[in-house]
């Protein structure tokens, strides 16, 4: 099992990241009734439009320089691959990412523009690569997007910023795919403010964490969702061990709720957010205000294909 990130390690990562990561602001979700109890953590404003730069850069920065010089690799639906390519350029090394051939075109092209190489394969091959640890047969230094403890530690810096900027926070909604993000952020939150409620958010069509908690062990589920950034159909032993004791509740969001949140953020807050990034807002809006209290929602990523966004905005059946 992976050891839970410690507060001192997360604080050290914050110093390591200070020149490449933005301390993103908290702003209120737009509301016509004047409510300001839902705050948005704008990780869409990072250099690669997602939080992934925090964990990836931290993991690469602590590598032995000789190992790093071999080049970097990962597996990704797109956001980790973008962060890896950006980080590789920073350190002057190469980056290659195994990605599903069904990934958003926006994400694939961004990886190339950052200088990375997307290796496009069928989705089944992506998860085979991970489960069989195929990277062990390659020369690259592999950065696991979920189970790497150094990745989790880097992501934990979000928790430091939330408590610093909103010390009276009651509830934080965090999207969950493989679990690396919530493993880091929740570790920081619970260390600084044990009473804070950590809500893990998953789409109804890909709820591996909820099923794992139901069974009491890592589980696999079918996965069908518009939220490609969290479309991970299983939990790993390493991550499940970290998350036990950190999460107060798992919230499932229907596809319609995700689409409505994307539309609301675009029209109300003038923000472009992908499906996985909108999950937290959809979950908060579906939770009674008196239950959640002062709330922070992580907007984790903003890479959405233009045609998909236009379709969502133009569909009168999608209610923001």
Image (cartoon, rainbow, N blue to C red):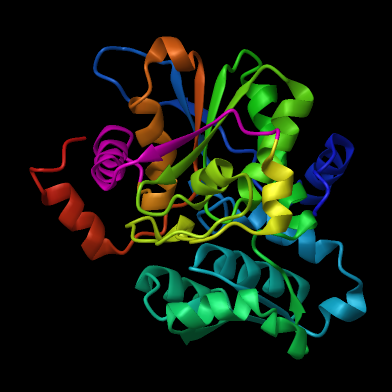
The residue that appears at 61% across and 51% down in the rendered structure is 179
Residue that sits furthest to the front in the current view: 215
Quadrant of the drawing holding the C terminus: top left
Q: Which quadrant would residue 98 be assigned to in this image?
A: bottom right
Give the left or right position of residue 100, taking residue 219 as reference. Answer: left
The residue that appears at 56% across and 32% down in the rendered structure is 25
Q: Is residue 255 magenta?
A: yes
Quadrant of the drawing holding the N terminus: bottom right
Expressed as whole percent of the image width and height from the top left, the position of residue 124 reads 46, 79
Expressed as whole percent of the image width and height from the top left, the position of residue 300 reads 50, 47
Q: Which quadrant would residue 36 be assigned to in this image?
A: top left
Give the left or right position of residue 35, taking residue 46 as reference. Answer: left
The residue that appears at 28% across and 47% down in the rendered structure is 255
**Can residue 8 be seen in the rendering of this structure?**
yes
The residue that appears at 78% across and 27% down in the rendered structure is 191
Expressed as whole percent of the image width and height from the top left, the position of residue 310 reads 19, 56
**Can residue 100 be seen in the rendering of this structure?**
no
Q: Is residue 304 magenta?
A: no
Residue that sits furthest to the top in the current view: 290
Expressed as whole percent of the image width and height from the top left, the position of residue 164 reads 70, 23
The one of 57 and 136 positioned closer to us in this rendering: 136
Vertical side of 98 occupied by 50: above or below: above
The one of 253 and 42 positioned closer to us in this rendering: 253
Vertical side of 253 occupied by 288: above or below: above
Q: Which residues are magenta?
A: 245-271
The one of 37 and 183 positioned closer to us in this rendering: 183
The one of 94 and 79 positioned closer to us in this rendering: 79
């Amino acid at each position: 099992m992976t050891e839970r990130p410690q507060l001192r390690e997360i604080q050290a990562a914050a110093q390591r990241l200070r020149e490449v990561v933005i301390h993103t602001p908290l702003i209120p979700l737009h509301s016509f009734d004047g409510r300001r109890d839902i705050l948005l953590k704008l990780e869409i404003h990072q250099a690669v439009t997602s939080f992934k730069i925090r964990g990836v850069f931290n993991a690469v920065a602590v590598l032995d320089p000789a190992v790093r010089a071999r080049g970097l690799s990962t597996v990704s639906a797109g956001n980790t691959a973008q962060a890896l390519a950006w980080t590789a350029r920073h350190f002057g090394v190469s980056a290659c990412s195994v990605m599903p051939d069904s990934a958003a075109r926006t994400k694939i092209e961004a990886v190339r523009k950052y200088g990375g190489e997307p290796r496009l394969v069928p989705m089944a091959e992506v998860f085979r690569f991970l489960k069989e640890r195929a990277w062990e047969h390659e020369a690259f230094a592999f950065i696991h997007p979920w189970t790497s403890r150094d990745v989790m530690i880097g992501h934990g810096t979000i928790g430091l910023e939330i408590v610093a900027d909103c010390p009276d926070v009651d509830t934080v909604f965090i999207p969950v795919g493989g679990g690396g993000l919530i493993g880091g952020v929740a570790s920081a939150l619970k260390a600084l403010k044990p009473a804070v409620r950590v809500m893990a958010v998953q789409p109804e069509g890909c709820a591996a964490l909820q099923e794992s908690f139901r069974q009491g062990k890592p589980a696999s589920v079918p996965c069908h969702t518009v939220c490609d950034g969290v479309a991970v159909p299983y939990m790993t032993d390493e991550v499940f061990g970290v998350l036990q004791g950190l999460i107060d509740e798992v919230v499932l969001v229907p596809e319609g709720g995700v689409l409505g949140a994307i539309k609301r953020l675009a029209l109300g807050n003038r923000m472009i957010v992908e499906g996985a990034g909108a999950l937290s807002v959809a979950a908060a809006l579906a939770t009674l205000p008196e239950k959640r209290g002062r709330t922070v929602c992580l907007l984790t990523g903003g890479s959405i294909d233009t045609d998909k966004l236009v379709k969502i905005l133009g569909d009168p059946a999608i209610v923001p």
